[in-house]
Image: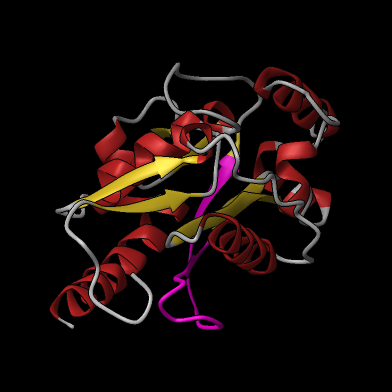
Amino acid sequence: MPGGGRAPGARLVFATRNQGKLRELRQLLALDGVEVVCLDDLPAAPEIEETGATFADNARLKAEGVMQATGLPSLADDSGLEVDALDGAPGVHSARYAGPGATDDQRLDLLLEHLREVPAGRRSARFRCAVAFADPARPGAVELCEGSCEGRILFDRRGSGGFGYDPVFFVEQLGQTFAEAAPEQKNRISHRGRAMVRMAAYLRRHLGQQAAE
């Protein structure tokens, strides 16, 4: 509540309609007394256009935009895949890599086609994630946490879990793709997991402090 303590049963809006991301966030944050909802739970919440030049820019834009529209504390992330052989593409365009409305399979097909002639030794890549938190109780103050995970792109899909580019992103530390890993394995080392662990620590302090005010 602006200017005072936060009421029991507070809501935190995660500015996404991606159910895979929402599941990961709920597993990673596990904040007692805080209900995590997404944009699908708030039909009036706007879609914030990702016009930033970096993942951090886009995360800030979405967190602040949704916070201003809903009056609720808002969390937003922007994440994507950087492939060295493609000069860092798809990068901030990861979700739109194959055009508006494309499916995960279509984006994967395009990525694999662009890398078709690239040998195994030159398929290094990383996932990056930036997470931003905006709170109407602290206007103008946006907390930002970031994380990354190194890997390489396979020639074919492996695994049925995860979402997005997970089936082709192989992580040496796991010995498998993100799509083959159990959720707890992925969350422990993933780009989003690392960023969210840092953000969760901040939110526990921040929300706990607000509850005591």
Answer whether residue 132 is magenta in the image.
yes
Q: Which residues are magenta?
A: 130-152
The quadrant in which residue 87 appears is bottom right
Left or right of residue 139: residue 96: right
Task: Using the image, determine if residue 175 lies above or below residue 29.
Answer: above
Task: Using the image, determine if residue 148 lies above or below residue 171.
Answer: below
- Front residue of this view, candidates 69 and 18: 69
Count every numbered label the image shows and give the total: 0
- What residue is rendered at 53% in x and 61% in y? 67
Left or right of residue 111: residue 78: left
State the quadrant of the N terminus: bottom left
Answer whether residue 134 is magenta in the image.
yes
- Front residue of this view, candidates 62 and 56: 62
- Front residue of this view, candidates 134 and 129: 134
- Front residue of this view, candidates 122 and 103: 103
- What residue is rendered at 78% in x and 47% in y? 93
Q: Is residue 174 visible?
A: no
- What residue is rendered at 21% in x and 62% in y? 7
Give x and y (percent) for residue 59. Answer: 60, 62
Q: Is residue 63 visible?
A: yes
Left or right of residue 165: residue 41: left
Give x and y (percent) for residue 94. Answer: 72, 43
**Magenta-highlighted stretch: main secondary structure?**
strand
Looking at the image, what colour scheme do you see?
secondary structure
Give x and y (percent) for residue 171. Answer: 45, 43
Give x and y (percent) for residue 85. Answer: 78, 49
